[in-house]
Amino acid sequence: MRDGLALRPVGEDALLVEADCTERAESLYAHLLARRSELPEITEIVPAARTVLLDGIADRAALARQLADWQVSLHPPADGPLVEVPTAYDGADLPEVAALWDVSVEAAVRIHAAPEYRVAFCGFAPGFGYLTGLPARYEVPRRDTPRSSVPAGAVALAGPFTGVYPRSSPGGWQLLGRTTLALWDARREPAALLAPGVRVRFLPVRAPR
């Protein structure tokens, strides 16, 4: 393929498309969804940080030939629905993140809440979306020692991504705050609020007592 993309066969009926950056993987995923009717039958299209997995392909050779001519630029995908996440910025790692950014805690909150994020891909746990949109200069490392338990609703960031823990689980991301919004509810349709392409805004709110 062209423009920083490479095809890898996986198993008997899947292809993995590798991209040179998250933004191109996002663009490729949007292209595949938009042009799915032109392609051989595919059971699943699964985006990740720098890959898109095409699984359950009816004719892998035909699809590989078709994709070989594709050019996928870095144009942002079309806007998806917007989810607003009310967030109390009282996370245990907020002062440390503010220090890494060399700003006050109040300024760190404004920096994190300013962008409109986009779900690039999902994983780690049901309902967990990896959000892009924070400028690269604000990337922070994961914690040296992961926590054995991060509470559900924790708003966190690590590397180029922001996320919200949909349920309690171990985690090594830097905790900025918390939300009472249910990111995952198996009784709801759809169960996950966040899916690839969904836009997200964090709304600072007073911490509940």
Image (cartoon, rainbow, N blue to C red):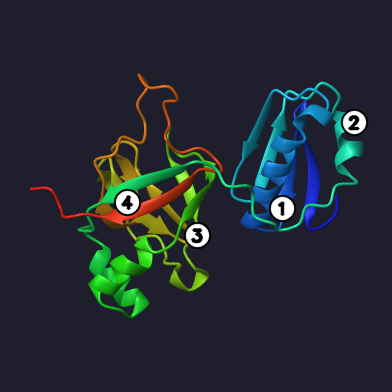
The residue to which callout 1 is attached is 19
Asked if residue 119 lies left or right of residue 187, the reply is: right
- Residue that label 4 marks: 155
Binning the other alpha carbons within 10 Å of mark 2 as few (below 14), some (14 to 19) or many (20 upward) gives: some
Front tag of 3 and 1: 3
Q: Position of residue 19 (x, y in %)?
A: 71, 53
Write down the quadrant of residue 43 in the picture: top right
Find residue 133 and report its horizontal and vertical position in percent: 50, 60
Identify the disc placed on residue 133.
3
The secondary structure type at the circle numbered 3 is loop
Q: Secondary structure at mark 1?
A: strand
The residue type indicated by label 2 comes to Ala
Q: Are marks 4 and 2 in contact (CB under 8 Å)?
A: no
Earlier-in-chain disc, 3 versus 1: 1
Looking at the image, residue 144 lies above or below residue 14: below
Left or right, 174 with respect to 198, comes to left
Residue toward you, 3 or 170: 3
Q: Nearer the viewer, mark 4 or mark 2?
A: 4
Q: Residues within 10 Å of mark 3 (few under 14, many from 20)?
A: some
Compare residues 102 and 13 and report the one nearer the observer: 102
Give the distance between the C-alpha atoms of the residues marked 4 and 3, in whole angstroms.
Answer: 15 Å
